[in-house]
């Protein structure tokens, strides 16, 4: 019976299969441990990124608010300067009109005085 399988051959095959199954179980448990460690690292990086993003957002929001306040201040200053310039321009126009009227009256007075002297 040289072609028949002996119990010793079967026990060797079963032992080899058990050894392969144990090795696969060990590798699978290591893969799960590595996957869990990677998941923890990914979560930590995600939390750090989220915290940094929040910090940058808060910083940029503060800067935008500062720039908005500065813009409002500049607009108010420009409005004051414009109002001041408009007021000065109105005063200059009134003074010019008044000086022209006074000049005309002075010319008339000078003509009247010269006319009286000549007469």
Image: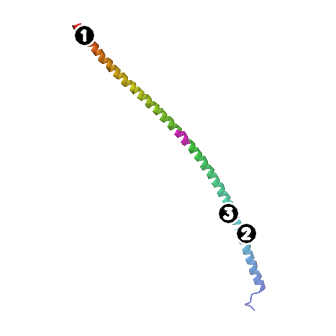
**Side of 43 relative to 95 (left or right):** right
Q: Residues within 10 Å of mark 2 (few under 14, many from 20)?
A: few
Question: Residue under circle 2?
Answer: 26
Callout 3 touching callout 2 (CB < 8 Å): no
Question: Magenta segment, which residues?
Answer: 63-68
Callout 1 touching callout 3 (CB < 8 Å): no
Question: Residue under circle 3?
Answer: 35
Residue 26 in percent (x, y) is at 73, 69
Earlier in the chain: of badge 1 and badge 3, it is 3
Residue 67 in percent (x, y) is at 52, 40
- Circle 1: element type: helix
Position of the N terminus by quadrant = bottom right
* Image coloring type: rainbow
Q: Which residue occupies 66% across, 57% down?
A: 41
Q: How far apart are marks 2 and 1 (CA)?
A: 128 Å
Q: In this view, does 106 lie above or below 16?
A: above
Question: Residue under circle 1?
Answer: 114
- Circle 2: element type: helix
Discs 3/2, front: 3
In this orientation, which residue lies closer to the viewer: 84 or 18? 84
Residue 89 in percent (x, y) is at 39, 27
In this orientation, which residue lies closer to the viewer: 109 or 41? 109
Position of the C terminus by quadrant = top left
Q: How crowded is mark 3: few (under 14 residues within 10 Å), some or many (20 or more)?
A: few
Residue that lies at the very extreme toward the bottom in this rendered image: 1
Residue 84 in percent (x, y) is at 44, 28
Earlier in the chain: of badge 2 and badge 1, it is 2
């Amino acid at each position: 019976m040289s072609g028949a399988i002996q119990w010793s051959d079967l026990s060797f095959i079963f032992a080899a299969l058990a050894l392969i199954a144990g090795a696969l179980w060990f590798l699978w448990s290591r893969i799960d441990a590595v996957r869990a460690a990677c998941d923890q690292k990914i979560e930590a990086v995600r939390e750090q990124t989220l915290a940094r993003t929040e910090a940058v957002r808060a910083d940029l929001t503060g800067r935008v608010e500062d720039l908005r306040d500065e813009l409002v201040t500049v607009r108010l200053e420009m409005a004051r300067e414009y109002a001041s310039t408009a007021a000065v321009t109105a005063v200059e126009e009134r003074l010019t009109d008044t000086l022209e009227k006074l000049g005309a009256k002075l010319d008339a007075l000078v003509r009247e005085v010269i006319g009286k002297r000549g007469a």
